[in-house]
Image: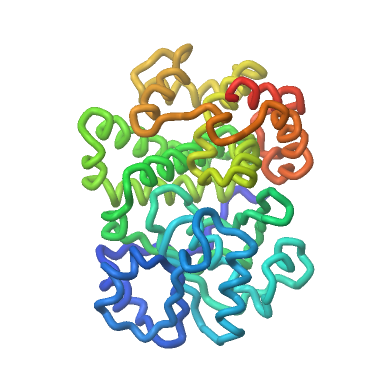
Amino acid sequence: MQLFKLSTKLHRSETFAEFAKDFELNEHDLVLTNEFIYQPFMEKLGLPCRFVMQEKYGQGEPSDEMMNSILRDLGGASFRRVIAIGGGTVIDIAKLFVIKDLTDVMDAFDHKIPLIKDRQLVIIPTTCGTGSEVTNISIAEIKSRHTKMGLADDVIVADDAVIIPELLAGLPFRFYAASSIDALIHAVESYVSPKCNPYTRVFSVAAMDTIIDVFKKIAATSPEERHKYAADMLIAANMAGIAFGNAGVGAVHALSYPLGGNYHVPHGEANYQFFTEVFKLYHAKDPKGAIAPLEAHLAELLGSTVENVYDALDGLLGQLISRKPLKEYGMKPEECRGFAESVLVTQQRLLKNNYVPFSVDEIEGIYNRLF
């Protein structure tokens, strides 16, 4: 059984200009990014790359429609490298664009074409949450099917991942909070995954320690405090990505997908809704397994008792961003059962990483309690 793998080379540059020089960006590079990142950090450099601004093709989570629109505009142009500079949407799109002869992303998601890597992939995260720069997963909203799908294959793993603290400076606090909570969820879910092992646990714990420490400092002062710890949070999110890239995530992510797919709730915010409720059920079903040392460690970090650890965690996270009832997103009571049934059918890739199995009734119960 494989325990650990990391094929991506990790780099750090203090500024984008330093990165551009070190990587010798040129006319053979396709750069996928956002206008609000391009203007302050890239435009003045006059680089000869082909720049594509993701938001011109739609807002929110990546979708099959968004990706295919970009592909059509590129018109089969030849590039040696694809460079993703952005959050989860930009990164997930760019991963698909390294696949040879791709003209419709659904051919990749449905495995209708051979997945062959045709370009080098460089990823620079500008949020502190996805960890996607070191995973083999791309997630997209499939609008025609009203759900999200994931493509997991080593073909779409980044060749290089670069941490650039400068690029976090303009990230609004709400996006910072949601993405970094997502990173914490990656660390915690992977800790109790059946595929967790001593190697992945090191990265899970290191990520948890840093993220919770920074959250406590922000909660005690102000959101502006986050800027002091930009590099720390990028590294912690990266470590959480390494952990879940090897051990996987489970029910928190699985249950969030219908909420994101049907009501367009951003990925990190959707995961946040289900985080502690899933872990409370895990504890109720098997309190003495891998969840026991996790809860003890979290209690120590939070300064709480083990018995109150999830209340303490909710309290800390709630000081960063409020958690809303599912009905406030537009969800209807009758959808609780339908979402539960859909998750069991469509999200087995994630549910196989559950700490303990969930039945359809138990999943429905989580939706009902959070409604």
Numbered circles on residues, count? 0
- Kindly indicate the quadrant of the structure image that contains residue 76: bottom right
User: Between 66 and 301, which is closer to the camera in this rendering?
Assistant: 66
Percent across and percent down for residue 298 are 43, 25
Percent across and percent down for residue 271 are 54, 38
**Which residue appears at 64% of the width and 27% of the height?**
367
In the image, residue 137 sits, relative to residue 43, either above or below, namely: above
In the image, residue 262 sits, relative to residue 281, either above or below, namely: below
Relative horizontal placement of residue 133, taking residue 303 as reference (left or right)? right
Residue 160 visible in this rendered orientation of the protein: no
Relative horizontal placement of residue 102, taking residue 370 as reference (left or right)? right
**Which residue appears at 53% of the width and 68% of the height?**
94
**Which residue appears at 42% of the width and 24% of the height?**
313
Percent across and percent down for residue 179 are 43, 45
Percent across and percent down for residue 125 are 41, 58
Residue 236 visible in this rendered orientation of the protein: yes
